[in-house]
Amino acid sequence: MKNQIVIASLFLGAVALGTNKVQAQKSEQATTTVSIVLADVISIDEGSMASEGAVGFSYANAADYNSTKNVTVPNSLVIISSKNFDVKVKSEGANFVSGSNMIPVDVLQVKAVPGGSLSGNMNEVTLSTADQILVSNAALGAKQSLNIDYSISAEKASKVLLGKPKGSYTQKVTYTATAL
């Protein structure tokens, strides 16, 4: 009987020791290092209205040539940038062209206007072939929208446009976002 008690005690001890080993294995740990690699980005979203968009001015009567015309385009540019940035504007050529007829691009004013989510120092520029800062020190962020106002003054309409041959005059305008 003593032998049976000793055997039973040893059996229970072995079972208890075996259970502790299983529990010790369940509490082992492993570690992993997770890295996040960031790159500076700046991008003008393809959904921007200025991306292959068009802005039109129509001069059909005397009143048109005697008044300032404005076209405001909401969400002209939608920009993502990991750093503060500038937005520059320029024309691809020196003139709006219709066949062999030309109108100088400086007839057009381009202005960054409030209303979008983009913040920075907003400027108005006379269009030219040189890069000009439309928005300076814009804050970094994602999906920031910029509204742009295009205008031709009554003075420019009456002095530059009036008397030009009829036709549709066009020129490409390029916007560039540059990280600071």
Image (tube, rainbow, N blue to C red):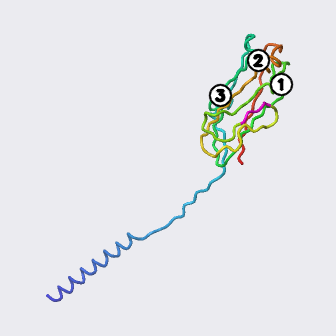
- Label 1 sits on a secondary structure element that is strand
Circles 3 and 2 in contact, beta carbons < 8 Å:
no
Q: Is residue 158 left or right of residue 33?
A: right
- Residue contact at pointers 1 and 2, CB within 8 angstroms: no
Query: In the image, what residue type sits under mark 1?
Result: Pro
Residue located at (77% from left, 23% from top) = 170
Report the mark closest to the observer, 1 or 2: 1
- The residue at which mark 3 appears reads as 73
The kind of residue tagged 2 is: Ser
- Which SS type dominates the magenta stretch? strand
Left or right, residue 38 beside residue 99? left
Q: CA distance from mark 3 to mark 1?
A: 22 Å
Label 3 amino acid?
Val
**For marks 3 and 2 on the same chain, the one whose residue lies earlier in the sequence:** 3
Q: Which residues are magenta?
A: 123-127
Quarter of the image containing the N terminus? bottom left
Q: Is residue 4 depicted above or below 155 in this figure?
A: below
